[in-house]
């Protein structure tokens, strides 16, 4: 049996927390709202980001917000290919790992160039468990729950819901065809996280996309209004 | 900084592999086919197991196969409650962990009592990543992909598909309402695992449940026909 000494100390986690806080502060200084999107595989993160880009890029009045996406997967660049027609995007592949960590996100941001737009989205690996335990320096954590997954999921995956600021209920168009109650899902999630903002929407037909974009813009205004942000 | 010596050797994984093999052999000796069910959250593992129980319990001709379920979740006993009206079931809660490991399964089986029926199902934690790396001593690994998740998932979560024997395509009733091609999903999965058995079905209306049950019974017959199984 080979032996190897591993030094285990409180420093490890503290260091990760510090690095996330530093990254968050840097984003705040730039005026960029950093959003970490978490969900099961296939809940519609990529479709929502495409719909968000379409919504802002076709805005008639006022400034059109600039956004970019750092998208994570175990393998393939399929999501980056889907998003590339709409927004600047960098694919991160974890090579099998079940969640994103900050160093990979930082490298991806460098690959994006000097992004100073209003909104930077991290599309995490499709996984309702592991990403919940990793702070990527985001200002907002958004969890997507699709109507086809069932309204009993929050209680079964509590950490992901407890650590999120908003819950998007996606695939609203399928409600007539599946056993799902928006009210039951909301109650179950707010049992865990009472302050959760709930945003039902459908990315394919555009229902609720305006409220989602309004929410993001309001959160960015709050960020800019903070005293430390000059 | 506190220090702690961790002995890292090949023994750790080898021991786990040995224990899984021993458990598999014990199941083989009992004539019980052990099936490990893996999928994203909400893909319909519990619904499929309920439909399987209904199918067998209402069989008119021949012996009705006996089945039991060990069901895994991070928290709550919701799935066990759903299954309890149909089959013997034990809920395993991981307390936040992202996959099941063999010792928990062995304890759950003990809680079930002296089960010697034909089919024992392990419903893993809803997660398309981490459960793929853990051998629970199963004879068959079955991955569920629901039509609402999209047909691009196999390539994005390759290990789960590569290590599976069969892919159930669930929620067939929703195909008219979602962008999903059974052919594309099958091609993508077989690119990774050419020997994959593909079984499209709908647990709610019963479509394909007979083929699924036939498949399981055929796999059990193969198991009993192996020379080491006396």
Image (cartoon, coloured by chain):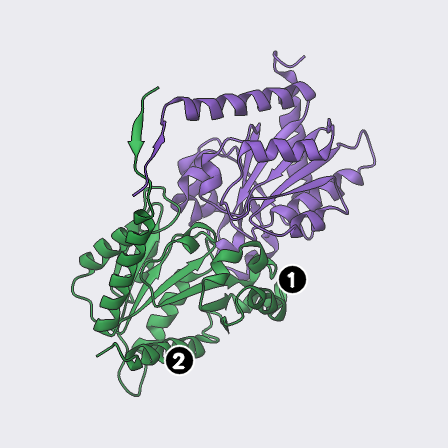
Chain colours: A purple, B green
**Image quadrant containing the C terminus of chain A:** top right
Q: Secondary structure at mark 1?
A: loop
Q: Is residue B51 left or right of residue B40?
A: left
Sooner in the amino-acid sequence: mark 2 or mark 1 = 1
**Mark 1 packing: few (<14 Cα in 10 Å), some, or many (20+)?**
few
Letter of the chain that mark 2 sits on in the rendering: B
Q: Is residue A119 left or right of residue B30?
A: right
Could you tell me how far apart the alpha carbons at marks 2 and 1 are, in whole angstroms? 29 Å
* Image location (x, y in percent) of residue B148: 56, 59
* Image location (x, y in percent) of residue B4: 30, 28
Q: Secondary structure at mark 2?
A: helix
Q: What residue is pinned by disc 1?
A: B179
Q: Who is closer to the viewer here, B31 or A157?
A: B31
Q: What residue is pinned by disc 2?
A: B214
Letter of the chain that mark 1 sits on in the rendering: B
Q: Quadrant of residue B225?
A: bottom left
Which numbered disc covers residue B56?
none
In this view, the residue farthest toward the front is A2
Q: Residue at x 16, y 62 (%)?
A: B113
Q: Residue at x 18, y 58 (%)?
A: B110
Q: Is residue B71 left or right of residue A45?
A: left
Q: Who is closer to the viewer here, B215 or A230?
A: B215
């Amino acid at each position: 049996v080979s032996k190897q000494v591993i030094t285990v100390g409180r420093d490890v986690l503290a260091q990760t927390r510090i690095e996330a806080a530093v990254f968050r502060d840097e984003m705040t200084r730039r005026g960029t709202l950093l959003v970490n999107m978490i969900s099961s595989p296939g809940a519609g993160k990529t479709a929502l980001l495409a719909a968000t880009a379409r919504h802002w890029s076709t805005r008639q009045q006022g400034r059109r917000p600039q956004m970019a996406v750092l998208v994570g997967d175990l393998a393939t660049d399929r999501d980056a290919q889907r998003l590339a027609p709409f927004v600047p995007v960098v694919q991160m592949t974890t090579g099998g790992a079940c969640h994103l960590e900050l160093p990979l996100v930082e490298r991806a941001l460098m690959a994006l160039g000097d992004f100073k737009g209003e909104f930077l989205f991290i599309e995490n690996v499709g996984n309702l468990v592991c990403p919940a335990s990793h702070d990527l320096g985001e200002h907002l954590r958004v969890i997507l729950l699709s109507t086809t997954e069932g309204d009993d999921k929050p209680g079964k995956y509590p950490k992901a819901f407890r650590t999120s600021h908003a819950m998007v209920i996606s695939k609203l168009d399928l409600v007539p065809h599946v056993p799902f109650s928006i009210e039951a899902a909301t109650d179950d999630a707010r049992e865990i996280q009472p302050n959760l903002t709930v945003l039902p929407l459908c990315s394919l037909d555009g229902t609720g996309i305006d409220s989602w974009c309004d929410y993001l813009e309001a959160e960015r205004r709050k960020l800019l209004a903070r005293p430390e942000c000059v």
